[in-house]
Image: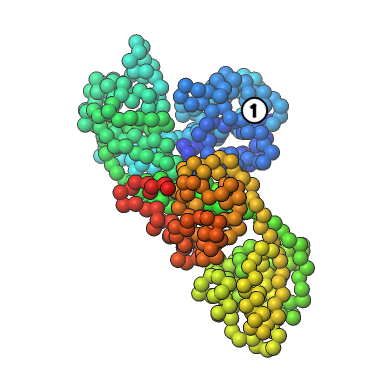
Amino acid sequence: MTVYLVGAGPGDPGLCTRRGAEVLGAADVVVYDRLAPAELLALAPAGAERIDVGKAPGRAALDQDAINALLVERGRRGATVVRLKGGDPFVFGRGGEEAEALLAAGVPFEVVPGVTSAIAAPAYAGVPVTHRGLATHVTIVTGHEDPTKDAPGVDWGALARAGGTLVVLMGAARASRIAEALLAGGLSADTPVAVVRHGTRPDQHTDRTTLGRLGQLEVRAPSAIVIGPVAGLRLEWFESRPLHGRTVVVTRAREQASELTGRLRGLGAEVIELPTIEIERVPFTLPPLHRYAWLVFTSVNGVRHFFDRGLAPAGLDARALAHLRVAAIGPATADELARRGIRADLVPERFVAESLLESFPAPGAPGERVLVARAAEARDVLVEGLGAQGRVVDVLTVYRTVVGPADPDGLARVRAGEVDAVTFTSSSTVTNLTGLLGGVPRRQPLAVTIGPVTSERARALGWRVDAEAAEHTIGGLCDTLVRLLRRPDGEPPHRR
């Protein structure tokens, strides 16, 4: 039985430490704050108890004493408890109070440090808190203390005289009073200030001003206020990414979404994963391969399921295909074959069945046999076309797609017009998302498809297809999104 006080970092789930992810993966109970990233909560086992104790200005799900009691009670049950806290547990996180309560109750605990927003938010805004010639030290202070009360806990005058960089956390509501106190303490009105809201998150926004004008700025929580010469530096990298401030929906199956999601996040987008399909195994018996001249794969999933389950339990040995010629629709499918030790003999220029038919050489003999490994729902264009060429075609169904689980929050954001674009990577993703939404949203986001077959299905269901990837790959899809959503003035596109 152990309670882990884990720093979740400031918002970007990638800033959680390896130790933090490790204990989350073994948690029986997760007690989390309101700003905990969903991606981190998802690291906990599906059956783990998740308890929201989030605090917001003027509201608290549980007060601190109740949180302390909860941690003690769950810890005494013998459960593995993760207290997931924003930033670092011991930097204005009240983690010390929770540790004191656990220690007094005799409940074992461990502190897993996290990246504090006092350092990360300025860094993501392109502001180093120390810099040669500008600042040799940094002071982190809470702004939750009212600087105008009779005996403030923070000596703002002393901080004004200390020099260096001042980072104020939890000071949004009192920014104007803090500025007045620092000016009264001797800081120049021209002192640069950077206000970083939602630091490290996809919706991060940085305002630049001076101490004299800080009171005129609307500062909203959660914000880190950076005061000092370093705030005048503009080493911007995060907010300058091409899709920063954009929200994109990914509809691929969860086990396939990682590549597209990773690329979009790397481009700066907020990604909403709405896995509209799930891949289900279809039991099959592998036919005698010596009968075939060609083996055709129409997707990455077809390759994976064919090899992994072709000869259970060990999977299919690539040497069984030594006499075959292999065709693949698309470079991703060919790459998956290469990972299995198979080089595709034929990959069409366009990544659709029609192009593969055009590329197929003439049959080597009358009645040449072809085995097509595919999904249960695949189109028959390829099978019929190869048959028309005089070949004998057998279909081996190795998987099927079914409707994925609905995420009510994500669907609600699509319906409300709170997303910039939705991506479709197959006809089934279009069909299933349309069904989950109850039709095409009235305020339809930009719809971007991976290829012509998917576009055709989208139009048939009433979607306005705004663009189709020139190259029918994940990379091509991302390039198209950048072209559509990037704006020279940095303003988000109109959501129709």
Q: Residue at x 48, y 39 (%)?
A: 11
* Residue 397 screen position, x and y as percent: 71, 66
**Vertical side of 398 occupied by 481: above or below:** above
Residue 264 in sight: no
Q: Pointer 1: residues within 10 angstroms few (<14), some, or many (20+)?
A: some
* Residue 362 screen position, x and y as percent: 61, 86
Near-viewer residue (425 or 107): 425
How many marks the image carries: the answer is: 1
On the rendered image, what quadrant is the N terminus found in? top right
Q: Residue at x 42, y 31 (%)?
A: 222
**Vertical side of 163 occupied by 337: above or below:** below
Taking the image as shown, residue 337 lies to the left or right of residue 415, namely right
Taking the image as shown, residue 242 lies to the left or right of residue 254, namely left
**Vertical side of 441 occupied by 193: above or below:** above
Asked which quadrant contains residue 187, the reply is top left
Q: Residue at x 23, y 28 (%)?
A: 212
Asked which quadrant contains residue 166, the reply is top left
- Colour mapping used in the image: rainbow
Which element type, helix, strand or loop, lies under badge 1?
A: loop
* Residue 353 screen position, x and y as percent: 58, 72
Q: Which residue in the rendered view is the most extreme toward the bottom?
A: 365
* Residue 56 screen position, x and y as percent: 48, 26
Residue under label 1, please give it.
108
Near-viewer residue (18 or 365): 365
Residue 63 in sight: yes
**Vertical side of 59 occupied by 434: above or below:** below
Asked which quadrant contains residue 191, the reply is top left
Q: Residue at x 21, y 31 (%)?
A: 190
Near-viewer residue (285 or 188): 285
Taking the image as shown, residue 316 lies to the left or right of residue 57, namely right
What's under tag 1, amino acid-wise?
Pro
